[in-house]
Image (cartoon, rainbow, N blue to C red):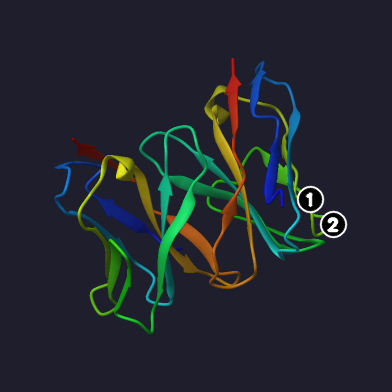
Amino acid sequence: NAGVTQTPKFQVLKTGQSMTLQCAQDMNHEYMSWYRQDPGMGLRLIHYSVGAGITDQGEVPNGYNVSRSTTEDFPLRLLSAAPSQTSVYFCASSYVGNTEAFFGQGTRLTVV
Amino acid sequence: GENVEQHPSTLSVQEGDSAVIKCTYSDSASNYFPWYKQELGKRPQLIIDIRSNVGEKKDQRIAVTLNKTAKHFSLHITETQPEDSAVYFCAASSGSARQLTFGSGTQLTVLP
């Protein structure tokens, strides 16, 4: 059982480049979300989805886009990378409601 | 939106002693409060959670207490061991999709 899989694990981008962080889960969870983790600031919600075709903004959505065409996949797109987007990104999935969130292994992104 | 504050940011204890981490939340509609443990370079993993209809929950050496009136909840770890050393995050769920808002984390170090 793979759980939540994120790719890539590490990425270096130049300012202005775009890229997509991939997230896939095999637990048939309706709810998926993206967080960024910065030192001293915990995990901040970027975007989330409660099912295929439904997405919404979290606390820090600017500069990021998401889509949810299938239950399994929830990619995060950086439109024009900025140094302020240097962070560790985590994807998570769960059943909708107050249940355990399962996290992917994270993507460490550096924007130079 | 929800705001979760977590204290202390760092905590050092001697092996065998107890550790307590405290969180406060702002949204009275929040009704689910999980705690996650994150070891260095790893993904966050759920260690215990509590729902608003319960005041206390225990799981071996770990317990969580909730005071809904004061909007406080706390994590208690007894008989600490070196493998308890990690960053601990509290969270509260709120909003239409019960999205999680995380505290800023506590670095717990258990000294042998």
Q: Secondary structure at mark 1?
A: loop
Q: Residue at x 22, y 47 (%)?
A: B8
Residue B30 falls in which quadrant of the image? bottom left
Residue under label 2: A70
Chain of the residue that carries numbered disc 1 in the rendered image: A
- Distance of mark 1 from mark 2, alpha carbons? 6 Å
Is residue A98 in sight in this rendering? yes
Tag of residue A73: 1
Where residue A38 appears, x then y in whole percent? 45, 35
In the shown orientation, is residue A22 left or right of residue B80? Answer: right
Where residue B62 appears, x then y in whole percent? 30, 62
Where residue B29 appears, x then y in whole percent? 43, 77
Dots 1 and 2: beta carbons under 8 Å? yes
Residue in front for this viewpoint, B29 or A97: A97
Q: Secondary structure at mark 2?
A: loop
In the shown orientation, is residue A37 left or right of residue A90? Answer: left
Where residue A85 appears, x then y in whole percent? 57, 30
